[in-house]
């Protein structure tokens, strides 16, 4: 071997060894700091202050060091000086858990009359009404009465009770004439819309000259069947028409939650009252869309009469959906051509403009060219259009890229360093809290860098969340990662299900957050309710020793895929209905299809009563197309037998 080459090899080996030793040394230092941090935190909580101080001095460059300082502040409580608190928040105010402690301190400053320091440290991140009231009261004491009066009115006129810290401000505001009967009426209205009925009843005392009318407002809103007594709501002495319009609007809206049919039947007796346009649209939206969700065609003329210019998008959407569901295709076509331009530009309504034309005028043909234009969109409607125009699905994948300097800047941000350390320690909830909090302050390019970083860590959910917040939709490797591929493929094959579909369900359910828990109690990658997990485990012989086993990724995928297979069988192998059942429950899907006339599946999906389930089904079907491409499996939006429900 030539001498020069030997020297190069020796040099390379030496560098590799040096790098390895440096890495091992760094790892050892980090492990030591983690142990010292845990010991310091335990000493602090145990009151061993001398040991805490000794350990703290060795942790100044450890990413989680600020949490020690924050805990020390909490332990000392009001003994901490205002200057110490200010110094801490200047240095470490970016901690996600710091705002609660800061709000407590701001209240202390107000109690101690430290207004200069309070103003210096107050920021809009504080949504504490008590602090806002005290600041407004101080403005008044400083001579800014007009500003304080306005702020007091804003803080008082809300649909909920405010904290006692607001009482001094409100007392002075009332004494200065701020609380007029019109203001009291406005708050009664807000309270009733928020269903704070006890508060609304209490507020009637502030309307001495119109107390009977205010009491009628509360009584009718809480018992809307009182609207059947039409004579009580005729304009006259003591009953101005605009106030009666408020009573009718709020009461009809509340009635529509339980009984929209009766509310709609009562409407002709009140429609001539002088409603504000926003109220008329709100009544129409609440009654009309609830009736439309029940597929009651009587809602069509009601919505058309009260929003003829299609000013409200939600009303317009449900008018079109109900026209499609009731077979009034020409009406649907006309509305899709008349809706506001902002709606016409959406792929959803571009699709239905073409589809309703075909349904209304069967001789119009395939409209292949028109569908081909829509097929450029990467969504449910674009994929449906691609199939109708015989075009390939437009995936349009483009990997995200950022400037290395931006990536380095994000990497060195305090919140990112803390999140990565929590992640390394296995404290995933704390890691996510830091990760999401710091992301609030990032630019779009920094959010993309953060998403790329999460992808490198195989931390799927934060990567998906971050790239979505950045509205960078084209990196399909981040948005649709091949996570847990081996168990998903194996379980799909074992249950004779489409792997892309199982992937799509998992992606939609949790975005691959293995420890996900919903408010309803669903758990894990495929978001299984505890009862469903138990029943599925028993039915299919899957080991489940305790409820938390559902959070084991492989176990969750086995249980979720088995349950999905069960639904697939219940609905005769129809992924459209099985997907809806996975989200809303099989009972609801049977209810939605009971006594239904034969219907194209795209119309059935579009008119699913639950917005969440409609979006869910469309996302799952389109995600399956994307995962089919990634897995090299042909997966259409809907199989031939799924395109029509009868």
Image (cartoon, grey):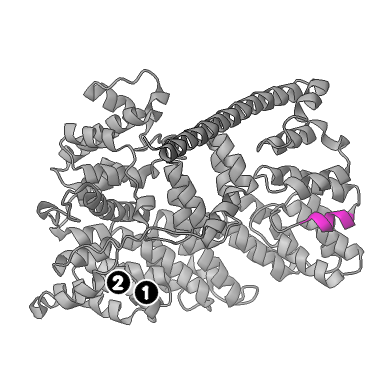
Q: Earlier in the sequence, mark 2 or mark 1?
A: 1
> Residue 265 occupies which quadrant of the picture?
bottom left
Q: Position of residue 279 (x, y in %)?
A: 51, 71
Establish if 597 lies above or below 561. below
Residue named by callout 1: 343
Span highlighted in magenta in the image: 115-122
Establish if 298 lies above or below 402. below
Establish if 415 lies above or below 399. above
| Separation of marks 2 and 1 at Cα, in angstroms | 7 Å
**Residue 403, disc:** none
Question: Quadrant where the C terminus lies?
Answer: bottom left
- Magenta stretch encompasses residue 120: yes
Q: Position of residue 558 (x, y in %)?
A: 28, 30
* Dots 2, 1 in contact, CB < 8 A: yes
Left or right position of 65 against 233: right
Q: Nearer the viewer, residue 330 or 227?
A: 330
Q: Position of residue 457 (x, y in %)?
A: 46, 41
The structure residue drawn at horizontal position 76% and vertical position 52%, both measured from the top left corner, is 130
Q: Secondary structure at mark 2?
A: helix
Left or right position of 117 against 212: right
Q: Main secondary structure of the magenta part?
A: helix
Q: How packed is label 1: few (under 14 Cα within 10 Å), some, or many (20 or more)?
A: some
Residue at the far front: name it: 3
Q: Position of residue 514 (x, y in %)?
A: 41, 35
Left or right position of 431 against 115: left
């Amino acid at each position: 071997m030539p001498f020069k080459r030997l020297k190069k090899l020796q040099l390379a080996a030496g560098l590799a060894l040096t790098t390895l030793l440096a890495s091992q040394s760094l790892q050892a230092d980090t492990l030591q700091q983690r142990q010292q941090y845990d010991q310091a935190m335990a000493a602090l909580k145990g009151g061993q202050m001398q040991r805490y101080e000794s350990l703290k001095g060795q942790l100044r460059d450890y990413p989680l060091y600020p949490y020690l300082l924050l805990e020390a502040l909490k332990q000392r409580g009001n003994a901490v000086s205002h200057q110490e608190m200010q110094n801490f928040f200047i240095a470490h105010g970016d901690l996600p858990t710091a705002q609660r402690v800061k709000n407590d301190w701001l209240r202390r400053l107000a109690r101690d009359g430290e207004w200069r320091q309070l103003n210096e440290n107050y920021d809009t991140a504080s949504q504490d009404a008590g602090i806002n009231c005290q600041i407004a009261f101080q403005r008044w004491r400083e001579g800014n009465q007009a500003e304080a009066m306005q702020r007091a009115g804003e803080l008082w006129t809300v649909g909920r009770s405010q904290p006692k810290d607001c009482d001094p401000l409100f007392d002075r505001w009332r004494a200065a004439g701020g609380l007029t009967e019109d203001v009291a009426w406005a708050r009664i209205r807000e309270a009733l819309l928020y269903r704070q009925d006890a508060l609304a009843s209490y507020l009637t005392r502030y309307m001495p000259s119109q107390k009977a009318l205010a009491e009628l407002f509360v009584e009718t809103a809480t018992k809307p069947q009182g609207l059947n007594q039409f004579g009580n709501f005729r304009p006259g002495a003591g009953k101005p028409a605009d106030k009666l319009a408020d009573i009718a609007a709020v009461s009809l809206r509340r009635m529509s939650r339980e009984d929209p049919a009766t509310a709609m039947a009562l409407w002709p007796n009140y429609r001539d009252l002088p409603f504000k346009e926003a109220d008329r649209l709100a009544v129409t939206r609440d009654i009309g869309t609830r009736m439309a969700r029940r597929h009651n065609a009587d809602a069509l003329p009601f919505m058309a009469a009260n929003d003829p210019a299609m000013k409200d998008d939600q009303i317009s959407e449900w008018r079109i959906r109900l026209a499609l569901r009731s077979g009034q295709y020409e009406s649907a076509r006309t509305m899709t051509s008349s809706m506001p331009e902002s709606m016409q530009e959406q792929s959803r309504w571009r699709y239905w403009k073409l589809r309703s034309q075909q349904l209304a005028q069967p001789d119009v043909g395939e409209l292949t060219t028109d569908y081909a234009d829509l097929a450029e969109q990467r969504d449910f409607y674009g994929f449906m259009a691609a199939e109708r125009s015989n075009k390939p699905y437009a995936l349009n994948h483009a990997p995200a890229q950022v400037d290395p300097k931006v990536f380095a800047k994000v990497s060195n941000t305090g919140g990112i360093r803390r999140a990565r350390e929590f992640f390394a320690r296995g404290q995933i909830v704390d890691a996510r809290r830091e990760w999401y909090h710091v992301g609030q302050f990032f630019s779009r390019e920094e959010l993309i860098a953060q998403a790329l970083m999460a992808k490198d860590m195989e931390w799927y959910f934060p990567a998906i969340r971050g790239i979505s917040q950045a509205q960078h939709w084209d990196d399909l490797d981040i948005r649709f990662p091949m996570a847990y591929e081996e168990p998903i493929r194996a379980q799909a094959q074992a249950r004779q299900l489409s792997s892309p579909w199982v992937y799509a369900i998992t992606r939609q359910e949790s975005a691959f957050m293995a420890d996900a828990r919903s408010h309803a109690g669903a758990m894990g990658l495929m978001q299984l309710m505890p009862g469903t997990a138990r029943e599925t485990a028993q039915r299919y012989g899957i080991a489940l020793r305790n409820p938390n086993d559902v959070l084991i990724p492989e176990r969750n995928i086995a249980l979720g895929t088995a349950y999905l297979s069960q639904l697939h069988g219940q609905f005769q192998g129809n992924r459209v209905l099985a997907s809806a059942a996975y989200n809303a429950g099989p009972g609801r899907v049977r209810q939605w299809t009971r006594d239904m006339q034969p219907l194209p599946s795209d119309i059935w999906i579009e008119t699913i009563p639950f917005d969440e389930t409609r979006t869910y089904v469309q996302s799952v079907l389109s995600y399956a197309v994307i995962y089919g491409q990634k897995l090299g499996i042909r997966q259409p939006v809907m199989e031939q037998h799924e395109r029509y429900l009868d």
